[in-house]
Image (spheres, rainbow, N blue to C red):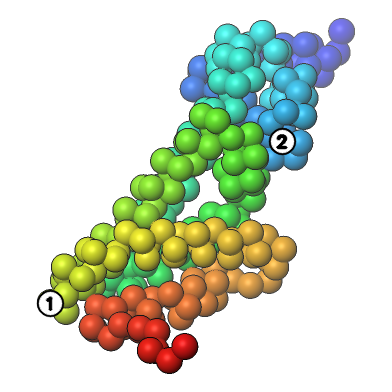
Amino acid sequence: MSEESAGEQRSPERARRLPRAVRERQILDAAVQVFSRHGYHSASMDEISDVAGVSKPMIYTYLGSKEDLFGQCIRREATRLLEAIQDGIKPDLPPDMQLWHGLRSFYRFVAEYRESWTVLHRQALTVGGSFATEITDMRTRAIELVAALVVSAGTRKGLGEQAEFSGAGLSAALVGAAESLADWALDHPDVSDGVLASWLMNLVWLGFNDLVEGEIWKPSTAE
């Protein structure tokens, strides 16, 4: 038997000796790829096993059923996304620049990890149930992050109470707009994360700024 053939036969044994954390990451990476391509219902454990290069029994042993695996994919990718946004925010800058940097990090994540965003924003919501609840929790954390910046900006202007009153609702609107623009950006990869973040800031933050300055739009009395 040649040395090369012996090496090929020994490689599965070496693979089995990988630390559990490394093996779980390998399986989750493969699962995200397959779920993003086919959706939860159409994705097969056979294909995930093939892409990961492990047996199906190993997947069940490490990460559980298909439902368990999908849930863990959602939780991992949601955590990675929120960490990317938080890491991008520079706390020593004014609130508007903090938000701009956070948005840049968000759009950079979506561009670099398209499969992750597809699982989070499209597949999980389509499946619904507990998976949609996971996404709702992620959105809530994102809204709280933005709302804190809105309140901070208002407090600097002496209008913290007004900013607190409307901050959560406006922040929810911003997060929704950011997600919609991210979907659009997937089909327009030539638009940079900085440009996308600036577009959203011009659309939304200018309105926030008017709010914290006390300039509030009201409908005219004319019908």
In the rendered image, the residue lying farthest to the front is 223
As rendered, which of 211 and 10 lies closer to the eye? 211
Name the residue type under label 2: Gly
The residue at the point 64 percent across, 20 percent down is 66
Mark 2 and mark 1 lie on one chain; the one further toward the N terminus is 2
Measured as percent of width and height from the top left, residue 215 is found at 28, 86
| Residue of label 1 | 158
As rendered, which of 127 and 184 lies closer to the eye? 127
Name above or below for residue 93 compared with residue 128: below
Name above or below for residue 13 compared with residue 211: above
Tally the numbered discs. 2
Measured as percent of width and height from the top left, residue 11 is found at 71, 16
The residue at the point 30 percent across, 82 percent down is 216
Q: Which mark is residue 193?
A: none
| Residue of label 2 | 39
Label 2: state its secondary structure. Answer: loop
Measured as percent of width and height from the top left, residue 117 is found at 59, 48
In the rendered image, the residue lying farthest to the bottom is 222
The residue at the point 70 percent across, 13 percent down is 56
The residue at the point 69 percent across, 40 percent down is 36
- Left or right, 140 with reference to 74: left
Name the residue type under label 1: Gly
- Residue 98 showing in the rendered view: yes
Measured as percent of width and height from the top left, residue 217 is found at 35, 84
- Residue 17 showing in the rendered view: no
